[in-house]
Image (tube, rainbow, N blue to C red):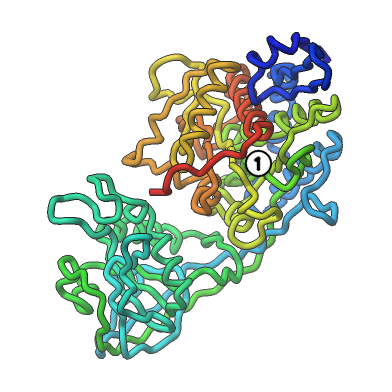
């Protein structure tokens, strides 16, 4: 190992927080500084390529969640961590975190209101089963509960059927009440928070009016109804609540002037639900390893990628998923190896680093949701950040400019400190072009909500999502390892390593210094 030796007076001004120092008490003693670039250099094109040509080969059958190819994938990951002598994260020594899932067939049924029948898939959309009768519905306006605004001050939704609408309240001057600006809050960006508030308050079921959302969920409903495979979800997820999205005609039957009515209230109604579906249980696994911190072992940096892909087409073609997310998977293995080399040299991270390979991303971020919402192996309130890697081996054909780039998403959503750190580290070690195109709040692709980092961000954990953008081979059998730009995969993986090194070794943990809007 190469060491850089400074005279004490020089070192005190030259060393930054990414360098560990050993200082003798006597004046004039030497300071030994660690350069993480030495360990980053172990992340090589050749090793990334060797891993990926195995991991994204036909032998792994497209790594579909719960299928034989996915089992081969987790066996490969386990074997690599064993070769590296990086232990499992679970105390019982098992690298696998079992994620119980079920494949639910699209339900069918009706809702009857005051004697009139409305059909699931025609008048409303839901993916849940429900047999129940209600003689009251609580209108909770936007269904929002925030620090300076609540729709629940004068209503009790416990055990009740609840109607809400999307959007959020505004002032007469066109600003939003919650933010106080012309920018909407988080409530306009993701409806799941409304459902979670109602679930936490004990509501029995929730109906939503959302003219923008309805066509999208109806389209998805029709696709899944005609699919042989059904829809995968977490089994017995007690945090879930029955929810349905209503079309314009049906919501007008319940509350005709809902667009202009912002006053929560109780409404008398006779509403019967008779919706049923079937499901098949299935098991899948996250793979989780850890390098314990030397000074702050009870603080955790999670680096994640998803191990699954979309499997085999009906015609037998295999979706190898070399970029999605074979590239992130092998990058994570190489980053883990670099940290292990540092640890073996006596320069392990101050904080613990969790290497989290999640399953079920392609089915709805299920593996990461299980880790964050159901069974976090390590406390979320001790998790300082999540660096998530999903597709970093290719070039976005729509993008103009330097090929040596990476899209960053979410780095400034919760922590300006993390965002600034990220840019500083890039300038010092990697010099990639950091592209924030998809970080825009109005990005129609909604990438911020579409990969596993989001399950950490919604729990107030600062994140960075590393991404190369989509391409013509996205979710197609042509996403093969021969199309990966291994020099870019190496450069991007090294950047993530350097960022992780800084987050893990700085004296203070990353601050949440920005509200999740």
Residue at 52% across, 62% down: 230
188 in relation to 245, above or below:
above
Residue 142 in picture, x, y percent from top left: 29, 65
**Considering only vertical position in the picture, is 327 above or below 485?**
below
Q: Nearer the viewer, residue 167 or 346?
A: 346
Q: Is residue 255 left or right of residue 103?
A: left
Depth check, front residue: 407 or 500: 500
* Residue at 43 percent of width and 67 percent of height: 197
Q: Position of residue 322 (x, y in %)?
A: 61, 33
Disc 1: CA contacts within 10 A as few (<14), some (14-19) or many (>=20): many
Secondary element under disc 1, as helix, strand or loop, is strand
Camera sees residue 420: yes
Q: Residue at x 13, y 55 (%)?
A: 172
Task: Please identify the quadrant where the N terminus is shown.
Answer: top right
Residue on which disc 1 sits: 301
Q: In the displayed image of the protein, which residue is found farthest to the left?
A: 172
Horizontally, residue 468 falls left or right of residue 175, namely: right
Left or right: 166 in relation to 403 = left
Residue 338 drawn above or below residue 374? above
Occupied quadrant, residue 355:
top right
* Any part of residue 56 in sight: no
- Name the residue rendered at 38%, 89% in the picture: 133
**Residue 446 horizontal/vertical position (percent):** 39, 43
In screen coordinates, is 77 left or right of 447? right
Image vertical order of residue 36 relative to residue 149, above or below: above
Give the mark count.
1
| Coordinates of residue 476 in the picture (x, y in percent) | 52, 37
Residue at the extreme front: 27
């Amino acid at each position: 190992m190469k060491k850089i030796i400074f005279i004490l007076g020089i070192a005190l001004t030259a060393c930054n927080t990414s360098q560990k120092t050993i200082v003798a008490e006597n004046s004039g003693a030497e300071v030994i500084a660690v350069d993480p670039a030495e360990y980053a250099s172990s992340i090589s094109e050749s090793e990334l390529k060797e891993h990926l040509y195995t991991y994204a080969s036909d032998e792994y059958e497209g790594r579909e969640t719960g299928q034989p190819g996915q089992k081969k994938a987790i066996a490969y990951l386990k074997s690599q961590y064993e070769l590296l002598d990086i232990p499992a994260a679970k105390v019982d020594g098992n690298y696998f975190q079992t994620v119980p899932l079920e494949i639910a067939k699209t339900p069918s049924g009706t809702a009857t209101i005051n004697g009139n029948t409305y059909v699931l898939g025609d008048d409303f959309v839901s993916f849940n089963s429900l047999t129940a009768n209600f003689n009251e519905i609580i209108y909770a306006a936007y269904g929002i509960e925030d620090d300076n605004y609540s729709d629940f001050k004068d209503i009790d939704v416990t055990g009740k059927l609840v109607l809400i609408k999307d959007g959020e309240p505004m002032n007469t001057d066109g600003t939003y009440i919650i933010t106080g600006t012309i920018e909407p809050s988080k409530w306009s960006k993701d409806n799941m928070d409304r459902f979670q508030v109602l679930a936490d308050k004990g509501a029995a079921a929730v109906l939503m009016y959302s003219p923008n959302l309805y066509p999208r969920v109806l389209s998805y409903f029709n696709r899944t109804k005609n699919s042989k495979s059904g829809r995968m979800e977490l089994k017995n997820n007690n945090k879930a609540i029955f929810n349905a999205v209503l079309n314009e005609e049906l919501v007008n039957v319940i509350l005709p002037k809902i667009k202009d009515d912002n006053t929560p209230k109780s409404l008398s109604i006779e509403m019967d639900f008779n919706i049923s579906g079937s499901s098949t249980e299935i098991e899948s696994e996250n793979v989780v390893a850890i390098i314990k911190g030397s000074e702050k072992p009870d603080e955790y940096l999670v680096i994640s990628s998803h191990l699954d892909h979309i499997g085999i087409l009906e015609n037998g073609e295999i979706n190898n998923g070399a970029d999605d997310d074979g590239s992130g998977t092998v990058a994570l293995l190489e980053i883990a190896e670099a940290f292990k080399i540092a640890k073996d040299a006596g320069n392990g991270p101050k904080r613990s680093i969790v290497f989290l390979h999640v399953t079920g991303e392609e089915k709805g971020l299920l593996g990461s949701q299980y880790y964050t919402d159901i069974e976090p192996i390590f406390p979320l309130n001790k998790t300082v950040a999540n660096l998530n890697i999903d597709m970093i081996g290719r070039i976005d054909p729509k993008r103009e400019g330097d090929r040596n780039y990476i899209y960053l998403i979410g780095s400034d959503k919760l922590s300006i400190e993390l965002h600034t750190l990220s840019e500083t580290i890039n300038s010092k070690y990697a010099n990639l072009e950091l592209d924030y195109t998809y970080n825009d709040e109005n990005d129609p692709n909604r990438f911020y909500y579409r990969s596993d980092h989001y399950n950490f961000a919604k729990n107030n954990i600062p994140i960075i999502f590393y991404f190369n953008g989509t391409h013509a081979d996205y979710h197609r059998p042509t996403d093969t390892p021969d199309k990966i730009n291994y020099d870019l995969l190496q450069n991007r993986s090294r950047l993530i390593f350097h960022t992780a090194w800084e987050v893990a070794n700085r004296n203070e943990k990353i601050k949440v210094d920005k509200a999740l809007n």
